[in-house]
Amino acid sequence: MQQNKRPMKELTNSQTIVKVQTTHQHYPIHIGQSLDTIGLLIDYLCHASKHNTRHAGRHNTRHAGRQAVLHIICDKMVYQHYGQAMEAGLTNANITYHLHHVPLIGEKAKSIAIYEQMLEKILASGIDRSHVIAAWGGGVVGDLAGFIAGTILRGVRLIQIPTTLLAQVDSSVGGKTGINMQAGKNLVGVFYQPEMVLIDCRFLASLPTRQLQAGYAEIAKYGLINDAAFFDWLQESGKRLLARDADALLYAIETSCRMKAAIVNQDEREAGIRAWLNLGHSFGHGLEKLAGYDGDILLHGEAVAIGIGMAFDYAEQIGKCKSGTAQIVKAHFTDLGMVMNPHQLALKVALNADNLLEAMRYDKKNYDESFTLILPQKIGKVEVVTGIDASTLHRYLSVILDIRL
Ligand code: GLY
């Protein structure tokens, strides 16, 4: 896949637009330090029909010329830091808005109960089909708000305003939405593309380092699945990025968004290469389930990092990947202060092949009672491996859970 990279210095203080172009929709991802979020929102709300293909008939006719009402589904911490500025901007611009705070922080908010609570609240505030939902927060808020936008009144327009690194490089782009169930992670949801993604790196200033590291795992994933040169760059620049160097962050965010957009453009519904983006996720989702979706124990991105290490270990064990590759990948994450040994997690159960296999069972990629894994052939190349039976997976889980760094 051809990546259109730009030199870092060009990015400083500029705004980049990456385009997502699926079969039925196209939308911009605005990336930049100088992004004027409020200004773009105003422009969007006042000229909605120009951007809107999914709802083209509806907005070009019935709602044309009307300024839409905004429903902001918002993370409490984000509101604490940036709420005043956002509200002042919206008020100054004469935008009618409703703020709906998500009552819980972390994966626990992606539940049926919170989904229902939020729906009732938004309906009570008088939403109609001309209104727009904005997801303002990290991946959890984006997934939950996206599912709400895709289902309320059979779908209203959606803007993603991601505030964590993970959401900026992965979850806000591509239209995956959903909530977690007892049986597993993200098992209920819809594909529902936003009409705009607004990435303002200034939100990262207040992000805890742990969250930054979690987002880094998804950035490294892009290099590992499809771009060895980008992984080389990360090996040189990862520390600078985690020290919040603006140029390094912008370059990594833009490269990630370009790759995500290119993959989603080819395979919106994950019939093929979009599954690559799940490198490390089958193992990671299993660990998150064993952690009870408790972000104090394990964040999604942390689970992905450990899962990536396990995928490389697994691939080496079955001879798919050259011996020593897993060590390079795991050493990179460890060097950046990330936990790679799943036994170090404060899980409430003693981790073993039995409980991890069980926790991995309900994954959307699995079918016919067999497992599907995304496994690396080398750094920069992965493949989708289907039809792995439970006893084979169990055997190799026992082996890789015994590997120590
Ligand atoms: N986060 C993986 C995907 O969007 O497909």
Image (spheres, grey):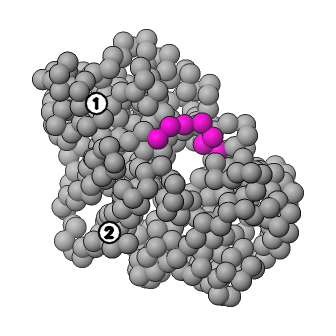
Q: Is residue 280 above or below residue 296?
A: below
**Residue 319, position as x, y percentages in the image:** 71, 83
Left or right: 74, with 324 as reference point: left
* Mark linked to residue 260: none
- Residue 260 appears in the picture as rendered: no
Mark 2: give few (<14), some (14-19) or many (20+) Cα within 10 Å: many
Residue tagged 2: 251
Residue tagged 1: 55
Are the residues flagged by discs 2 and 1 in contact, CB closer than 8 Å?
Answer: no
**Residue 208, position as x, y percentages in the image:** 49, 54
Quarter of the image that includes the N terminus = bottom left
Magenta residues span: 185-191
Toward the left, the furthest residue is 65
- Residue 374 appears in the picture as rendered: yes
Near-viewer residue (335 or 177):
177
Left or right: 160, with 13 as reference point: right
The amino acid at mark 1 is His
Q: Is mark 2 within 8 Å of ligand 1?
A: no
Q: Quadrant of residue 329?
A: bottom right
Q: Which residue is pictured at 76% across the width and 56% down the height?
A: 370
SS of the residue under disc 2: helix
Q: Which residue is pictured at 69% across the width and 43% down the height?
A: 184
- Count of numbered circles on the image: 2
